[in-house]
Amino acid sequence: MEAKIYQPAKTAMQSGRGNSRKWIFEYEPEEAKQADPLMGWAGSGDMRSQLRISFESKEDAIAYAVSQGVKFQIKEPKLRRIRPKSYADNFKFDRIK
């Protein structure tokens, strides 16, 4: 049994970073998904792959994994660099087009 701990990236449909502050604890799937012969839906018998737990901090997620005796991998988020912009720069005389 193995899990991953990560901080989700913001989606393309979001302008803010509201849902990307928390850390997610998610189990890795233990078996592959198979198509149901009758309906064609994808599914598996692995119930833990449906479980996603959110934590306020990375340390809380690690403490939970240690208390449950689960091996885990931590995926650090990429730091985004915010470049300051000014609306007035759009009208500068020596602006590069």
Image (spheres, grey):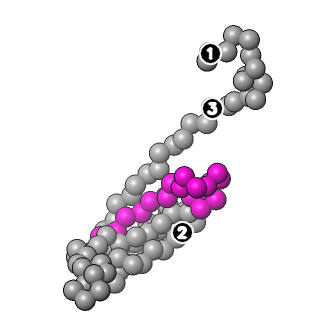
Left or right for 34, reference 49: left
Q: Label 3 crowding class (10 Å Cα cut-off): few <14, some 14-19, many 20+?
A: few
Q: Which residue is mark 2?
A: 55
Is tag 2's residue or tag 3's residue first in the polypeptide sequence? 2
Q: Nearer the viewer, residue 41 or 74?
A: 41
Res 2 → quadrant: bottom left
Horizontal and vertical percent for residue 32?
A: 22, 74
Q: Residue at x 31, y 81 (%)?
A: 41
The residue under label 3 is which amino acid type?
Arg
Kindly identify which residue carries mark 1. 96
Q: Secondary structure at mark 2?
A: strand
First in sequence, mark 3 or 1: give its number: 3
Tell me the kind of residue under disc 1.
Answer: Ile
Whole-angstrom CA distance, mark 2 to mark 3, is: 29 Å
Which secondary structure lies at badge 1? loop
C-alpha separation, residue under disc 3 versus residue under disc 1: 17 Å
Magenta segment boundaries in residue numbering:
1-21
Residue found 29% across the figure and 86% down from its top: 39
